[in-house]
Amino acid sequence: MTASVSTMLASINRYHDLQRQSRFKVFFDKIPGCCPNLADLSLRCESVDLPGRILNTYDHRTYGPVVKYPTQTFFGEITLNFICSSNKSKRESFRYTGMEEKTTFENWMNYINTYPSTSSRSQDYPYHNFRYKNQYVADIYIICYGTDEKETPSYRMDFERAFPTSVGQVPMTWASEEVARVPVTFTYDFFRFTNQCDCDPETGTLIQSTNPPRQQAPSPPTPRAVEVQDFFPESGGVIGGGSTTVTPNGNLAND
């Protein structure tokens, strides 16, 4: 039996509105290895696919049909798409200050696995070394909002211990004046979400989580510029060309 129009409307009217795809915002608690304007970075993210969760299974058969059993949880990667800015304004020397969104995540990846920033840098230096994971991961938060006047948060996902695995291609062509965009793919340990129910390990019953994700977006730190993004894998220091250094734990300090 099909539902009537009034039944459908009554079901929708129980909520303020349906969730709109454009009502979202992405936050980073930090960017290891550099310190961009995190507020601007959040505004540059124009699209994202909220990832799902997959249970890997194996097939088992003793007699009769094959049945499946879960063996492992798989959290899919997440890709954020950013619009790219051009050169900064109101500066005496503003050449090569564009594509800040692209260079931010490239510098993050360079912090994970450093390569020389200039051809004069010694090629014998052990640039192939990787840092420890706790030095280069960060948390990512995606908050969806309602359409009410206060833009009340409606849903939130927290991605724990994330880091970029790919900075995608940026197409450039003389045939278009479209804004450049860069996709960045992240992996993470797991995600949490609002109203998540936990399972009691002893009884197996579902219980409402007593520790839901924080309801307020993190406050971005005051941005500081880092002009050179070449690092010593052992000491964690920035190589030359500026007064800002990166300590081994990933924090920034001014000399």
Image: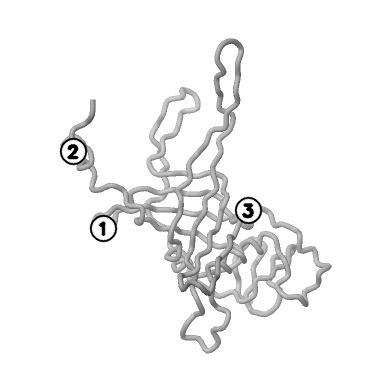
Discs 3/2, front? 2
- Residue 209: % across, % down: 41, 37
- Mark 1 secondary-structure assignment: loop
Q: Within 10 angstroms of label 3, few (less than 14), some, or many (20 or more) residues?
A: few
Is residue 108 positioned above or below 153 on the image? below
In the rendered structure, find residue 10 and report the number of the disc placed on it.
2
The answer to the question of whether label 3 and label 2 lie on touching residues, with beta carbons closer than 8 A, is: no
- Mark 3 secondary-structure assignment: helix
Q: Toward the viewer: 31 or 210?
A: 31
- Residue 1: % across, % down: 23, 25
- Residue 153: % across, % down: 33, 52
Q: Which residue corresponds to the image point at 43% horizontal and 53% vertical from the top-left?
A: 142
> Does label 1 or label 3 sit earlier along the sequence?
3
Discs 1/3, front? 1
In the rendered structure, find residue 134 and report the number of the disc placed on it.
3
Q: CA distance from mark 2 to mark 1?
A: 24 Å
**Residue type beneath disc 3:** Asn
Q: Which residue corresponds to the image point at 55% horizontal and 62% vertical from the top-left?
A: 31
- The residue singled out by tag 1 in the image is 150
- Mark 2 secondary-structure assignment: helix
186 sits left or right of 193 in the view? right
Q: Which residue corresponds to the image point at 38% horizontal and 40% vertical from the top-left?
A: 195
- Residue 253: % across, % down: 60, 71
Q: Toward the viewer: 253 or 37?
A: 37
Residue situated furthest front in the rendering: 175
82 sits left or right of 144 in the view? right
214 sits left or right of 169 in the view? left
Q: Which residue corresponds to the image point at 49% horizontal and 80% vertical from the top-left?
A: 88
> Does label 2 or label 1 sit earlier along the sequence?
2
